[in-house]
Image (tube, helix red, strand yellow):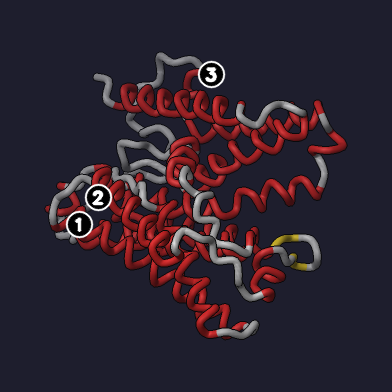
């Protein structure tokens, strides 16, 4: 028996009845394409308004740096949402992992790469532990992902506050900040951007070309079909949530490197921002559809908006309004695509 898998490269099902739609309607249904065009339009508008400030190498570097940590979070979230799940805990897991990394590095002492490696290992293990907890509770106790991850969101944040006493950890190795945090390859490309791009490329290949990726789409499309085909669906879901937790741990370490502090109160909306980026990028909240490439586009929507508003003198609070509006449009297009797919 073959496992039914949604083609990850397809924005519209091949059997969808789209003959009655206009060319513009068909384009709109390809949500990743439409969101990419929105991103291009924003870049063109901001460049026209403030070319000397917006369309510069330094500003492009700033936008990419701002988007890096969110991109790492959103990559893990893409896998989760493709399985028709959700993970509200990633922001708190990010903070908790950063706290663990900082405490470990301070306990070891020193300013060398050995200390930094211990810190990143601690962050990854901490994130993995929360991800395994989420996946196990969801699959074994049959508690809905929304409730499980909402609970772990509070637990991880509370645990971070208990460990630190509510005070940010500000003592981290200067080598970490000077290299991963603010360093640049050839004095041009920030290392933190390189790491985020490497994560996106690696897991983009995993999602598109491997059995793990095919199983992820299959579970999101119809969990019962792969189960009948002999796939261990529960085990796969645990792996997916473990992956999301591990990448949240990596994001916590990158945030620590960039800001040289744990920023306990600075990530309360990271979970929602990651979900918004994934959905903006064309991943369906109903599962079975999505790509890492689309998520990359979705991550840059809020980053470009915030940067452009600041440069053009518009209050940055409008960014939240604009992202919310685009998000609603993206979900509407997803629903329109699904209605078109299942139309008789």
- Disc 2 crowd rating (10 Å Cα; few below 14, some 14-19, many 20+) is many
Question: In the figure, 80 relative to 311: above or below?
Answer: below
Residue 137 badge = 1
- Closer-to-camera residue (311/239): 311
What is the spatial separation of the Cα atoms under label 3 and label 2, in whole angstroms? 41 Å
Q: Residues within 10 Å of mark 1 (few under 14, many from 20)?
A: some
In which quadrant will I find the N terminus?
bottom left
Q: State the image coordinates of residue 168 (x, y, percent, origin top left).
A: 53, 61
Distance CA(mark 3)–CA(mark 1): 44 Å
For disc 3, the marked residue is 24
Going by the image, does 74 lie left or right of 193? left
At numbered mark 2, what does the secondary structure look like: helix, strand or loop? helix
Q: Disc 2 versus disc 1: distance between alpha carbons?
A: 7 Å
The residue tagged 2 is: 148
Left or right: residue 152 versus residue 41 is left
Q: Position of residue 95 (x, y in %)?
A: 46, 58
The image quadrant where one finds the C terminus is top left
Q: Are marks 2 and 1 in contact (CB under 8 Å)?
A: yes
- Which residue is rendered at x = 47% and y = 43% of the image? 269
């Amino acid at each position: 028996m073959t496992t039914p898998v949604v083609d990850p490269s397809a924005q519209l099902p091949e059997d969808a009845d789209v003959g009655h739609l206009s060319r513009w309607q068909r384009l709109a249904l390809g949500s990743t394409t439409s969101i990419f065009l929105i991103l291009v339009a924003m870049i063109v508008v901001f460049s026209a308004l403030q070319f000397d400030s917006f369309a510069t190498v330094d500003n492009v570097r700033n936008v990419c740096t701002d988007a890096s940590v969110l991109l790492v979070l959103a990559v893990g979230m893409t896998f989760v949402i493709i399985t028709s799940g959700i993970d509200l805990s990633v922001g708190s897991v990010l903070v908790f992992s950063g706290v663990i990394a900082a405490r470990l590095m301070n306990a070891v002492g020193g300013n060398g790469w050995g200390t930094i490696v211990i810190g990143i290992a601690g962050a990854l293990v901490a994130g993995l532990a929360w991800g395994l907890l989420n996946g196990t509770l969801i699959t074994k106790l049959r508690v809905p992902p929304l409730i499980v991850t909402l609970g772990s969101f509070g637990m991880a944040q509370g645990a971070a506050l208990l460990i630190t006493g509510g005070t940010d950890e500000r003592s981290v190795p200067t080598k970490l900040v000077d290299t991963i945090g603010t360093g640049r390859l050839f004095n041009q490309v920030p290392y933190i951007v390189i790491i985020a791009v490497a994560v996106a490329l690696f897991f983009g290949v995993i999602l598109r070309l491997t059995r793990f990726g095919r199983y992820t789409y299959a579970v999101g499309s119809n969990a019962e079909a792969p189960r009948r085909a002999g796939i261990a669906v529960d085990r796969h879901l645990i792996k997916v949530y473990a992956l999301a937790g591990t990448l949240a741990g990596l994001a916590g370490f990158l945030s620590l490197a960039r800001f040289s502090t744990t920023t306990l109160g600075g990530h309360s909306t990271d979970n929602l921002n990651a979900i918004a980026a994934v959905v903006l990028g064309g991943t369906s909240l109903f599962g079975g559809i999505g790509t890492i490439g689309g998520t990359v586009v979705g991550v840059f929507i809020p980053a470009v908006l915030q940067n452009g508003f600041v440069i053009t003198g518009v209050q940055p609070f409008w960014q939240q309004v604009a992202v919310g509006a685009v998000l609603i449009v993206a979900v509407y297009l997803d629903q329109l695509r699904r209605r078109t797919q299942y139309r008789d």
